[in-house]
Every structure is written in structure tokens, then in C-alpha cells.
Amino acid sequence: MKILFTIASLMLFPLAAQAEDTLNGANTAWVLTSTALVLFMTLPGLALFYAGLVRSRNVLSILMQCFAIAGLASVLWLVVGYSIAFGTGNDYWGGLDKMMFSGITKGSLVGDIPESLFALFQMTFAIITPALIVGAFAERIKFSAVLLFSAFWLLLVYAPITHWVWGGGWLQKMGLLDFAGGTVVHITAGVAALVAALVLGPRRNFGRILPHNMTMTVTGAGMLWVGWFGFNGGSALAANGDAAMAMLVTHISAATGAMTWMFIEWIKYGKPTALGTVTGMVAGLGTITPASGFVGPGGALIIGLLAGIVCFNATLLIKQKLKIDDSLDVFPVHGVGGILGTLLVGIFASTQLGLFSGSGFADGISSIGGQMQVQIIGVAATIVYTAIVSYLLFKLVGLMVGGLRVTSDQEAQGLDIVDHEERGYNL
């Protein structure tokens, strides 16, 4: 009997090994859905969210920038961006072996999903990250400068850092926990936004500019909330418990962030605002992103609460105290949220916190102190690299297009007419 069992085991072993490389239909279906949700976050979600926050004479320029970046990033990701991020290069650079999606066929897999789907899912992340930066230089930058900066930035900042964190690079090997883009997406976009605001300077009448269409902004915010389930849940790359928990904690943090910001405004100013509530929601989403696959519901509640408090005060600091015109609060919401979430996952991933426990630290790390050390290194490296390269790119692009900003008269006229010879509203 023992001999027969041994023979049967040997016969089945090749089938078991082959099964590991077989496409999983359920996982593929979930990541297909998530990919659509992440693209939905940018178009139309982020585009509407941002467009409602600017003045009516610039609404089309914001929509156009988001659409153009989506197209530009998609092409660049195909040509070389995916290769830089997920090629087999070294610890810092993926190389060029996957240019033009070389080697990707109908049958090639990443894990148990098609590599074509994995590349497309990652493409939607490459679309939304430079699009987030639009909120920092809204209403005053040349359209040509937006395109050039976004192209260079995608290839020289986003793609390399993606390789560091998710593509087998040095931060991934060190054990950095970033489930869906605290460093890769939110810190990079937030830091680049702060650099943009400092380089370009404030808009005319800065401090007295009001959103022209809050209905549009709230609609876009709702789309972001829904789309974020694909952003975080899809990053599990499987239809499993990790994806389900990521979605659950994403929702809890978003809801808590929204309520926290709302009540802070209510206490501080006497009335809660729709703008504050949706901004708190985005802060909760951005902050939970790196932690979404590693923390539990209790940890998500604390993360959402801290996101609302910290990002609210960061917004006041940037706008009112430092007088920096990060037009649509990209750095205090996404940048600060990404930093906060990336650090907090080093605490709430612990399995020793009772009701606030998570799923555990990275392999080889056994303590909060050890994980926090890695998280701090990841945050610091991302900030420094992004800030330096973004600054140099803004200076380079400024030289290429004869200055980043439109003229004062053009800014007063509005970028819809200046850049596109169209109006958002023909009344």
C-alpha cells in the first residue's frame, strides 16, 4: 500500500507543479474588474473632483490635463515604463528587457493571472499618479509643460520607485510594507505637487479663490471612493481574503476620515462643509492605501481618525501659515496621508495589538521597531529622490517651453480659452 501511495504521489507531482502556473479564472475576473475601477478613479473621478474645485474659466483645462495624461501615460507605459518598473534589471532599475511589453503573450502569467492584465492594472496606477499632481499647478501652467513634465516624471520618478517597492527592488527586499501605493503613488505625487507649488508660485488672488462647482466635486469624490476598492482590493491580485480585508479597511478609513474632518470643521467654524467632508474622505483613502493589505478593521479606524486630524492641520499649515498655493491640496492630503499611512502600517500590522492587530510584519521582521525602521527608510528615500528629480524636471521643462507659467493676462482670461479655445459653459 505504501508503495502504491508513493507511485501515485510521484505521478501527481507534475500536475500539482503545473497547477501553480495555471490561470485562475476567479482571480483574473477580480483583477479585470479592479483595473476598470482604477481607471474609473481618474476618468471621470479625479477629473471631476479637481474640475469642480477650480474657477469656471479653467474647468476644461483640468479635464483636458487628466485625459491627456491618461493617454500619454498609457503609451509610455507600453513603450518603456512597464519595463523600468517590472523588468529584471537590478535593485534600482528594471531595465529595458520588457520594452513594448516584450514577452507578454496570451499565455504568459504573473502568478496565476495573465501578465497582460497585470501590466494593464499597473498601467492604471501609472495614469492616476501623475494626474494627482495636476491639483498643485492648476489654473496657471502651460499645457505643453504639463505634458512634458508628466512624461519625464513618469519614467524618471514613478517607474523607478515602483521597481524599488513592487518590482523586486531594494525596498521590497528590505521588507517595506506598501500594499497599494503609499510610497509609490501618494508620497511621490504629494512631494512632486509641493515642489510644483514652490517652483510656480501662487495664483493671482491666492487666498480668495472659491470652487466653481461643488456638485461636480462631490460627484467625483464619490467615484473615487468606489474606485478605490479596485485600487486597494485589486492589489491583492487575487479574489481572496486579502482583497476582502483590503476593501473593508479601505471603507472604514474613508468613512472615519470623512467624519473626522467634518466634525473638526463643525467644532472649529460652526458648520460642516461638503468640501471638508469629501477631502477628509480622500485623506482617509490615501492614508489607508499602504496599510490596506496588512491591518485589521480596528487599525483602519485609528488610521482614518488620524488621517482626518493630521491632514486637516497640514492643509491649514500649507495654505494659511506657509502661504504655499498647492491649489487643490495634493501634498497635505495625498503626500502627508501617504507618509502617515506608510509609517502607521509599521505599527498596526502587528499581531500583538488585540482589537487593533493586523496580519503581521514582513518576512524576517519580528517587532514594531524593526518594521518601523524599514518604513522610515522607505518614506525618506521616496521623499528625497522625488523632490530632487521633480525639481530638476520642472527647471528643465521650463527651459524647454520658455517658462512654466502662462502670462498674467492669460491667467486672468483662463486656460480654457488660452490653451484649448473652448469654454466649459456656453451660457
Image: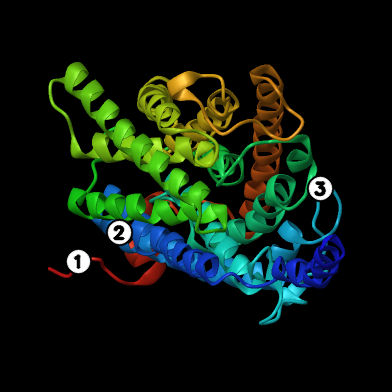
Answer with left or right where residue 132 lies relative to residue 157: left
Q: Which mark is residue 425?
A: 1
- Quarter-of-image position of residue 277: top left
Q: Secondary structure at mark 3?
A: loop
Residue 321: x %, y % from top left: 40, 19
Instruction: Looking at the picture, tell me which residue is in the foreground, 232 or 188.
Output: 232
Instruction: Looking at the picture, tell me which residue is in the foreground, 112 or 266.
Output: 112
Q: Nearer the viewer, mark 3 or mark 1?
A: 3
| Picture residue at 68% right of the left edge, 17% below the top | 369
Mark 2, other Cα within 10 Å: few <14 / some 14–19 / many ≥20: many
Q: Are marks 2 and 1 in contact (CB under 8 Å)?
A: yes
| Picture residue at 68% right of the left edge, 20% below the top | 367
Residue 37: x %, y % from top left: 41, 62
Q: Which mark is residue 92?
A: 3
Quarter of the picture holding the C terminus: bottom left
Q: Which residue is mark 2?
A: 59
Q: Which mark is residue 40?
A: none
Disc 3 and disc 1: Cα gap in Å?
47 Å
Quarter of the picture holding the N terminus: bottom right
